[in-house]
Image (cartoon, rainbow, N blue to C red):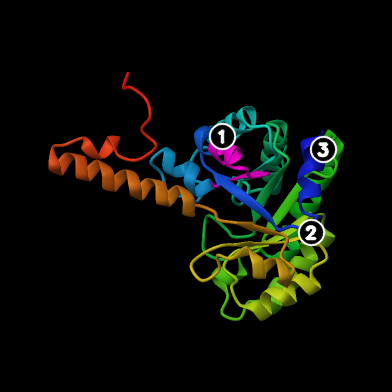
Amino acid sequence: MDQIKVFNDLHQGEDLLMLGNAWDVLSAILMEKAGFKAIGTTSWGVANTFGLSDGERLEFTKHLNVIKSIVDHVSIPVSADIEAGYGEEPAGIVENVLRTADAGVAGINLEDSLKSQKGLRDMVEHGKILSMIRKALDSRGYHDFYVNARVDTYFQREDPLSETLERARVYTESGASGIFVPGVADEYDIKEMASNISVPLNVLSFPGLTDGRPLKEWGVKRLSFGNAFSDQVIAMMEKTALEVLQTVNTKRLYEGEHYASEPV
């Protein structure tokens, strides 16, 4: 079945879609094996694998190669986190979205944060970019490609709810398939969004917002965990490496059920 259709359908069912955020081929394969129904890449995690921090510091072609490698090694839909589109001009952003679609993903996340300076892109301007993206995708044959419009108001505004709803309206009218609001945790705010936004609502987990069961009842359709899993893996690796070096003993590497084969 067409992965774009599968991915869209996952946002329309009764169940909350738990998106597995992967940062390389291995993490994506393991999440598929665990039973996740879709993968979303984490730009933060991908950048970390190259020794870089998030914020479009990784050259886009390198980033896209990681995304394509993940798509080529799993059988479930993949959505790509391409931050703000890796471009200053709308035409460059649209071209990068098309390149990402050509890599075989079922959708993207595109945020309205600015990268060259602090702040958010003007919502009307961002809406025009989304309209250009939708038109270009349709022209290329990517009908119903999932464009998840990320609204970063809860990271950059003191009283973000009303502006979030207005941006969500503009972005939806401009062709967004879903709205992603990271940073929101308040039950009232989430319910207001779910009630007033006409497309599926996606939120981000963080301490204090981890349980998907109430989120489903509040109207959220998709929950992702961003870079949290990759951060946990990195922290474990750092701790183990330090322990092995300080103790001059590799015993720690052979403990646990995971070690089941002879070394090669």
Residue topped by disc 2: 14
Q: Residue 196 at x, y = what percent?
A: 80, 73
Nearest-to-viewer mark from 3 and 1:
1
Task: Tell me the crowding category of disc 2: few under 14, some 14 to 19, or many 20 or more residues within 10 angstroms, Cα based.
Answer: few
Residue topped by disc 1: 29
Quadrant where the image shows the N terminus: top right
Question: Which mark identifies residue 74?
Answer: none
Task: Tell me the crowding category of disc 1: few under 14, some 14 to 19, or many 20 or more residues within 10 angstroms, Cα based.
Answer: some
Q: Residue 138 at x, y = what percent?
A: 85, 40
Question: Which mark identifies residue 142?
Answer: 3
Residue at the far top in the pictured view: 264
Q: Which residues are magenta?
A: 28-42
Q: Is residue 234 left or right of residue 105?
A: left
Q: Give the residue type at disc 1.
A: Ile
Q: Residue 184 at x, y = what percent?
A: 60, 71
Mark with earlier residue (2, 3): 2
Residue shown at 61%/38% (left/top)? 32
**Cα gap from disc 3 to disc 1, whole angstroms:** 25 Å
Q: Give the residue type at disc 3.
A: Tyr
Residue shown at 79%/68% (left/top)? 197
Q: Residue 144 at x, y = what percent?
A: 84, 45
Q: Give the residue type at disc 2.
A: Glu
Mark with earlier residue (1, 2): 2
